[in-house]
Amino acid sequence: MKNLKVKFILIGFLFVLLVNPQIINPASAVVDTTPPTLDWMTFDKGVVYPGDNLKASISASDDISGVSNIEIAFADPNGDWKAQVFPTYNATSGNWEANILINQYWLSGIYTIDFVYLQDNAGNSIYLYDVADYLSPTVSVSGTTPDTLAPAIGKIGRASCRERV
């Protein structure tokens, strides 16, 4: 019985070595040290209105381990951060996709990409700023009723309290 266990262990070990020879020679293993690259990005609409869903499609690639995470931040017409989305991978299209619900209180005007964050399965990552230099994904938001006033604090008073004995 003991010899049978040893034989099974040896056969299993030899099988693992045949399937994955890098275990014997780790120097031959490929190491991923570069972050993913952004290939392209598009929107399904050029003009959107309050209540619309804007679909962003993104193609990103990684030379070894594959893309694991993408984040996109949008800037409003004043250049201020407005929305952040986390696209998910669509195996059917082979692209990363996100839907952005257009809020009625956003500013009307042209929205641009503030930054794109890419990460691969090995943990390599990169923030891409100024993506308009090589991509031109913009969208025009129209028909909104912007809320430009910050909330105000009303009357502040001291609440009455009783002392407990």
Image: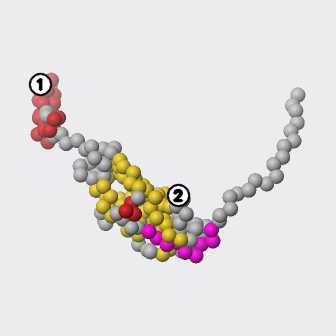
Q: Is residue 90 visible?
A: no
Between 1 and 38, the one lying in front of the other is 38
Identified by mark 2, the residue type is Trp
Q: Earlier in the sequence, mark 1 or mark 2?
A: 1
The residue sitting at 35% across, 47% down in the picture is 125
Looking at the rendering, which quadrant does residue 46 occupy? bottom left
Residue 81 image label: 2
Local SS, label 1: helix
Quadrant in which the N terminus appears:
top left
The residue sitting at 31% across, 49% down in the picture is 35
Residue 6 shown in magenta: no
User: Label 1 belongs to which residue?
Assistant: 3
Between 2 and 79, the one lying in front of the other is 79
By secondary structure, the bulk of the magenta-drawn segment is best described as loop
Judge the density around disc 1: few (<14), some (14-19), many (≥20) Cα neighbours within 10 Å.
few
Judge the density around disc 2: few (<14), some (14-19), many (≥20) Cα neighbours within 10 Å.
some
The residue sitting at 56% across, 71% down in the picture is 108
| Front: mark 1 or 2 | 2
